[in-house]
Amino acid sequence: MFSSVDRPAIISRLQSETFDLLVIGGGITGAGIALDAASRGLKAALIEKHDFAFGTSSRSTKLIHGGLRYLKQLEFALVKEVGSERAIVHRLAPHLVVPEKMLLPLYEQKGMGYWLTSIGLKIYDWLAGVKPEDQRKMLTRVQTINHEPLLKPNDIKGGALYAEYRTDDARLTIEIAKKAVQYGAILINYVGATDFLYENEQIVGVRAESSLEAKIMEIKAITVVNATGPWVDDLRELNHSRKEKFLHLTKGVHLVVPYHRLPVRQAIYFDTPDGRMIFAIPRGRITYIGTTDTDYTGDKSNVLTTGDDARYLVAAVNETFPSANLTLADIESSWAGLRPLIHEEGKSTSELSRKDEIFESDSGLISIAGGKLTGYRKMAERVVDRIIELKFEDRSLAPCTTETIFLAGTKRLASNEVDAYGREVARSISRLALKGAEGSYLVHLYGRQTDTIIDYALKHPHEDPEIGLALAELAFALENEMIARASDFLVRRTCHLYFNLHRMIKIKDPVLQAMAMQLGWDQKRLAEEAARVDNHIHEVTGFNKDQHG
Ligand code: FAD
């Protein structure tokens, strides 16, 4: 049951049953907890106020990484945990978590220096258990400049290549959510918790509201987990338990430019003039750059890139790659997200730890805050272990097995099969007059689920192959990925808003029409959905005209 047409049945079950665990928040943390709990045999439900991955989980740097910066902060345990998690998440979804070598240019006067970096990366590889062939490689000055001719050569001292993985955060989240459903959990989007239900001062569920059906409901649960990322403190306040530690939100912005405007040969992690570090990551037809790190106190549901954010990143790129000569006019798209960090007195935003922490309130609310995309599985394991310890020790539940639960459909795609499958897909889509790049896009987004999409496209030929493909992806998402609004599909299931805005503009009307037909929208709803999509396009590009300040 994971299609929007199942919504009435899901809402009815939410209202009539009592769950062992109710998770509030459908980002990667909440989805991970739902999967862990359901796969151990707990009866789990999850509600998400917006769409799955609407929050930070669609707005990250999209790296499954060991976190080199944590080594700088001497957080060895964190480096070790997320470092080994990278390899696990890659194994669980090798099409979606793809190895990417990162180049670290080293300068005379900036950063950690050549020898310290060499030792640091050695420790990083050791902590993360990196395979010998993927371990860091130190480069001379000439080798570094040859690796990336766009770099300003002046004061380069050398460089280092080290292993990371890139992903699509929103897709990873939705695949975890789908797997949780496969294990029997009930998940729904556009249902937000508005209050808690108590008996004898202990939480026994939540009051919730569905924004699509305008329905208020009560959901009963033995345990309730608050996994709302940047919104964690809002729910702790509602529960009168926001005490001692609290969240410190910082905003991170990414910019997207056409690849030919910043044609870096591989991902690069480089120093900024103000002593921070940012990434430039090539991805098909674009390169994206990020991120900023500034305190944020505005509207958490409407985080925007400002002209200042964009100018900061453009200046940093031009400092390192002067021949690029980027301007705001080169920016095709952007995104901005909030880091839900835990406040520490006297520390600057960049110094704050990215560690996760569990808070337990007197009335039984379990909140999980902080953390990383990369560490979602371990965070979920810790939360579910604690819930079992608190409430379900008398049950014979299975141990955590998420390390072995592969993601994306029911047919496994192993790491050594990805390339061969890619070639198979390229052959199939040539019958649809689609180019090879579309095959790579499909395989990296959907894994073996691509077969279902191609089958649909072959059965429903369209005079424009790109629109035909989009409608086939839409049919798949409508049936399997609970899309309720057009932006769920265009922004989070496909990532077109960020990585292929031209495609999004081309397909948006056919997509809107098809959704209206499938979901029975009237003219008013169709117009509202169209306006929302146009607003998204305006938001991610609007600072070009500087109206965001
Ligand atoms: P979210 O994804 O924000 O999910 C919380 C959800 O709760 C939201 O969808 C929200 O709508 C929902 N919600 C809120 N209130 C309610 C309510 N009342 N009822 C129901 N639902 C509610 N990590 C990495 O590992 N790699 C990276 O490359 C990386 N880059 C990053 C770059 C940036 C700029 C930022 C900001 C973070 C980055 N991170 C990265 C960290 C990572 O993205 C986050 O740790 C992670 O996505 C947080 O997920 P979450 O599920 O806890 O929160």
Image (cartoon, grey):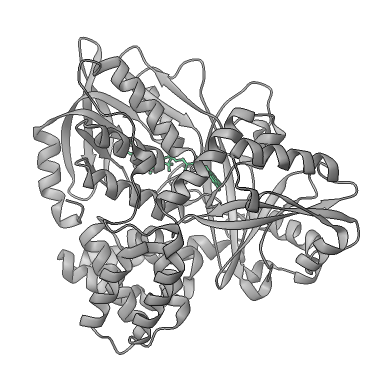
Q: Is residue 202 above or below residue 281?
A: above
Identify which residue, 485 or 30, lies in the foreground. Answer: 30
Q: Is residue 356 above or below residue 191?
A: above
Identify which residue, 347 or 115, lies in the foreground. Answer: 115
Name, please, the residue furthest toward the top.
200
Left or right position of 485 against 114: left
In percent of width and height, residue 190 lies at 27, 47
Quadrant of residue 284 within the rendered picture: bottom right
Quadrant of residue 228 within the rendered picture: top left
In percent of width and height, residue 217 lies at 16, 35
| Residue lying at 60% horizontally and 39% vertically, measured from the top left | 128
| Residue lying at 44% horizontally and 56% vertically, measured from the top left | 94
**Res. 9 in view:** yes
Identify which residue, 243 or 467, lies in the foreground. Answer: 467
Q: Is residue 298 above or below residue 431?
A: above
| Residue lying at 21% horizontally and 32% vertically, measured from the top left | 41
Quadrant of residue 274 within the rendered picture: top right
Number of numbered discs: 0
In which quadrant of the rendered image does the C terminus lie?
Answer: bottom right
In percent of width and height, residue 213 lies at 17, 49
**Res. 307 in view:** no
Identify which residue, 136 or 509, lies in the foreground. Answer: 136
| Residue lying at 42% horizontally and 28% vertically, measured from the top left | 368
Quarter of the image where ligand 1 sits: top left
In percent of width and height, residue 297 lies at 54, 37
Name, please, the residue furthest toward the front.
132
Left or right position of 153 against 404: right
Left or right position of 532 against 246: left
Left or right position of 212 against 301: left
